[in-house]
Image: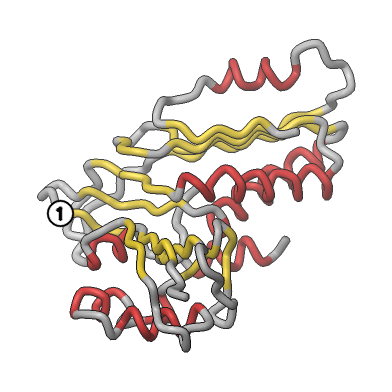
Amino acid sequence: MPRSLTILYFAWLRERIGVSEEILSPPDDVRTVADLVAWLAGLDERHAMAFKNRATVRCAINQEFADPAAILRAGDEVAFFPPVTGG
Amino acid sequence: MARISVQTENFDIATEIAGLTAGRTDIGGLGCFVGIVRDEKPSASRGGAIRALTLEHYPAMTLRAIGRIAEEAERRWSLLGCTVIHRVGRMVPGENIVLVLTAAAHRQAALDSTAFLIDWLKTKAPFWKREELPDGQGVWVEPKEADDAAAARW
């Protein structure tokens, strides 16, 4: 069964990748956030640039902060963004 | 239950205070923090002052994240009221960005919860600031270690 994820990008990740949202179906061996980042970074040059320094990328799954080890499920909304700077 | 708003328009502090205190006699003190867009002096590393600041956020997550931080403050300090307003979009130096108001029976709870709320908002709510320099160039604001340290003390 193809597993589709809605992937959102914010701030400079959105600028580097060129879109704010994409729906992708990664292969079955992509189980965690870290797996997804590694897979996305291999898609093309824009994604590679955005995920070049992984220490500066934060993630949320279904609007909750998530660790690199968090497990993905079909239909999840996965957001990638830099450390927050509001307030 | 905190009043939380994410909005493009400015807020009126007196109106917000009145909304928190109207008809109540149990409140002994209010804590208030207002964040304002600050212009910075031109420097070698920055090249120039700020012409404007644009705040981007993650709409589906923002209210939930602020709500959770506000609940934590209400619980820890037994607050009698709490208002958080965060603006998004483009703002110029001198404009308000964020308002934190807390109401408590005593001053220490009001003051400490206000500091807690702004410290956690800066590090746990999904907002990103982009500075617009006089030459039109845009620069994403880097997170500050001091902000993480401030949030960690709570």
Q: Which residue is located at x 67 percent, y 15 percent? A: B18
Total residue callouts:
1
**Residue nearer the viewer, A25 or B148:** A25
| Amino acid under disc 1 | Gln
> Relative to B20, is A29 above or below?
below
Q: Residue furthest top?
A: B23
Residue extending farthest bottom = A29
Return the residue at label 1: B137
Left or right: A32 in relation to B93: right
Q: Is residue B102 above or below residue B61?
A: above
Residue closest to the eye, A1 or B144 = A1
Q: Residue at x 29, y 74 (%)?
A: A50
Q: Is residue B16 left or right of residue A35?
A: right
Taking the view exactly as shown, the residue that stands out farthest to the front is A1
x and y, in percent, of residue A25 in the image = 38, 73
Report which quarter residue B92 is drawn in: top left
Residue A43 position in % (x across, y down) = 26, 80
Please indicate whether residue B134 sits to the left or right of residue B61 in the image.
Answer: left
Report the coloring of the rendering. secondary structure
- What residue is drawn where x is 32% and y is 36%? B91
B90 relative position to B97: left or right: left
- The residue lying at 65 percent from left, 47 percent from top is B117
